């Protein structure tokens, strides 16, 4: 019996010897090797990738089921897009004035595992003439703000889409698909969960057009919440003292530009 216990401890110690902590997770030697392979390949094509940390590379690997070649291709695509779309390193308020004026994206609180929470009011979003590029910049502005607000070791955020009052005038299929593309292609493994609240019947017609563009990993993170179960559903993931006031919590919403 003592030998069995001793053997178990030895195996455990061996496993630990072949792991490393990245963020808050233990990463196996196999995963570390894949991170090194992606980094080595990508750096030969884009030296700027040296500035990115192992957490970033691991997210791209996870998004491509740890396939080194696919993750490398995805990462290079991201770097090329980032250099082109965000040449100054960040999106400024002066680049998204009309989207900010809609007053539609807020943040407040963290869920039970420390992920920051944002709330978007779908009824305040309107498709604007010649406004798709500004909306794309606004999506990047919001995602960068959320990522910057994360505590060390945290990689994901939680979203709440409040659709009370949403109507056809708020329908923007091109905008929704563009936002999805940016999230999935350039911010992989950042979304933890996305709650959709008070979705009216007419929204589901638009949803059917958007749904085919959502990848399987993202689909699993989207939750349509019954109107009568909004608070009870949210508190499964978020402590009541971290909920916004509008959902029965204690916290006031803060505009995205004010964090």
Image (cartoon, rainbow, N blue to C red):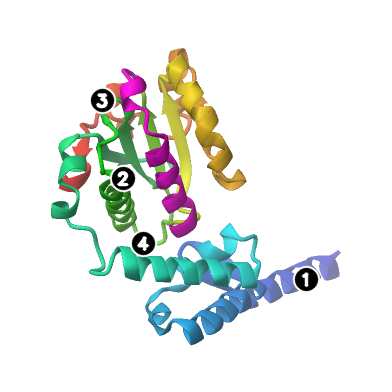
Q: Which mark is residue 211?
A: none
Q: Which residue is mark 2?
A: 132
Residues 69 and 53: in front is 69
**Is 64 left, or right, of 11 in this rendering?**
left
| Residue 256 horizontal/vertical position (percent) | 22, 44
Depicted 181 relative to depicted 83: above or below? above
Mark 2: which secondary structure? helix
Task: Tell me the distance, in whole angstroms, between the alpha carbons under discs 3 and 1.
Answer: 54 Å
Label whose residue precedes the other's in the sequence (3 or 4)? 4
For marks 4 and 2, the one nearer the N-term is 2
Main secondary structure along the magenta-highlighted residues: helix
Left or right: 253 as drawn, with respect to 58 = left
Q: Residue at 50% of width from left, 22% of height from top?
A: 205
Q: Is residue 253 shown left or right of residue 140?
A: left
Q: Which residues are magenta?
A: 164-186
Which quarter of the rendered picture does the N terminus lie within? bottom right
What's the CA distance linking mark 3 and mark 4? Answer: 27 Å
| Res 23 quadrant in image | bottom left
Judged by depth in the image, the label closer to the viewer, 4 or 2, is 2
How far across and how far down the image is residue 223, in percent? Answer: 51, 31
Residue picked out by circle 3: 245
Q: Nearer the viewer, residue 21 or 105?
A: 105
Tag 1 residue: 6
Query: Dot 3: few (<14), some (14–19), or many (≥20) neighbours within 10 Å?
Result: some
Decide: few, some or many residues near mark 4? Use Cα within 10 Å; few <14, some 14-19, many ≥20: few
User: x%, y% of residue 190?
Assistant: 45, 53
User: Mark 2 or mark 3, which is nearer to you?
Assistant: 2
Find the distance from the CA under tag 2 to the CA under tag 3. Answer: 32 Å
Residue that badge 4 annotates? 152
Residue lying farthest to the top in this orientation = 228
């Amino acid at each position: 019996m003592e030998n069995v216990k001793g053997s178990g401890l030895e195996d455990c110690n061996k496993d630990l010897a072949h792991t490393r902590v990245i963020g808050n997770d233990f990463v196996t030697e196999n995963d570390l090797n894949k991170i090194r392979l992606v980094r080595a390949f990508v750096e030969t094509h884009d030296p700027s990738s040296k500035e990115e940390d192992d957490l970033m590379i691991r997210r791209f690997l996870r998004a491509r089921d740890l396939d080194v070649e696919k993750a490398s291709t995805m990462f290079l695509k991201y770097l090329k897009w980032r250099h082109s779309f965000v040449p100054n390193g960040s999106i400024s308020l002066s680049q998204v004035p009309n989207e900010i004026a809609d007053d539609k994206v807020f943040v407040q609180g963290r869920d039970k595992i420390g992920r920051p929470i944002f709330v978007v009011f779908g009824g305040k979003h309107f498709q604007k003439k010649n406004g798709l590029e500004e909306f794309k910049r606004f999506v990047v502005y919001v995602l960068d703000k959320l990522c910057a607000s994360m505590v060390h070791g945290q990689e994901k955020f939680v979203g709440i889409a409040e659709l009370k009052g949403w109507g056809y005038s708020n329908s923007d299929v091109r905008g929704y698909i563009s936002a999805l593309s940016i999230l999935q292609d350039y911010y992989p493994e950042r979304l933890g969960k996305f709650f959709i609240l008070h979705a009216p019947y007419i929204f589901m017609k638009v949803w059917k057009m958007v749904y085919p563009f959502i990848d399987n990993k993202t689909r699993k993170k989207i939750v349509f919440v019954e109107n009568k179960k909004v608070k009870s559903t949210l508190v499964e993931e978020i402590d009541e003292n971290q909920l916004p006031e509008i959902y029965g919590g204690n916290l006031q919403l803060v505009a995205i530009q004010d964090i």
